[in-house]
Amino acid sequence: MNSTIPAWVNGTLAPVDKIDAHLRGLRHKAVSVFVLRGDSVLIQRRALGKYHTPGLWANTCCTHPHWEETPEHCAQRRLEEELGIRGLALQPRGQVEYRAEVGGGMTEHELVDIFVAEASESLKIEPNPAEVMDVAWISLDDLAAQTARDPERFTPWLRIYLSDHAPQILAGR
């Protein structure tokens, strides 16, 4: 598995080991996807074997592009690798940047390309147990209420997306 991601080192974009980027808190590229169905979003609970934030609920999927991989290709690849989801039309929603402590001495400092996709009722989801321990469809209102009530159950980035970037990500909802 390729663990080299694009990160900024001394002001220059360079390939850096993913764990090293997080331990050093380097600003790096990332991708996040929100799969929507009406007023609901597909969320995933991260597998317990993940190197940070295991067992927490996150948006549909997120990852880091490989060196020289386009954000859209990365998003499609990761939807398939994590959830077995293929063939959704991804709509770019711009970029957001955040910085958050994720435990274990690691920091996510990410410049994130956001994508949204609409799903049908018949969407086939086949979670990879090494990546995802559970999935759920939840209304956007319920997700906002739950993240406010029990923030420790959700990844820092999902809480940031909902509190700081929801109008950009969920435009028209």
Image (cartoon, rainbow, N blue to C red):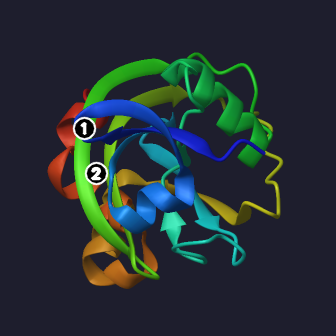
Question: What residue sits 48% from the left and 52% below the top?
Answer: 59
Where residue 145 sits in the image (x, y, percent)?
A: 29, 70
- Hey, which quadrant is residue 170 in on the image? top left
- Screen quadrant of the C terminus: top left
Front: mark 2 or 1: 1
- Hey, which quadrant is residue 169 in on the image? top left
Does the CB distance between marks 2 and 1 fall below 8 Å? yes
Where residue 130 sits in the image (x, y, percent)?
A: 80, 63
> What residue occupies the far front of the structure in this picture?
10
**Looking at the picture, which amino acid does disc 1 mark?**
Val
Question: Badge 2 is on which residue?
Answer: 161
Q: Earlier in the sequence, mark 2 or mark 1?
A: 1
Give the vertical position of 154 relative to 28 (above or below). below
Give the vertical position of 120 relative to 101 (above or below). above
Where residue 96 sits in the image (x, y, percent)?
A: 25, 38
Q: Which mark is residue 96?
A: 1
Question: What residue sits 61% from the left and 20% below the top?
Answer: 73
Question: What residue sits 65% from the left and 21% below the top?
Answer: 88
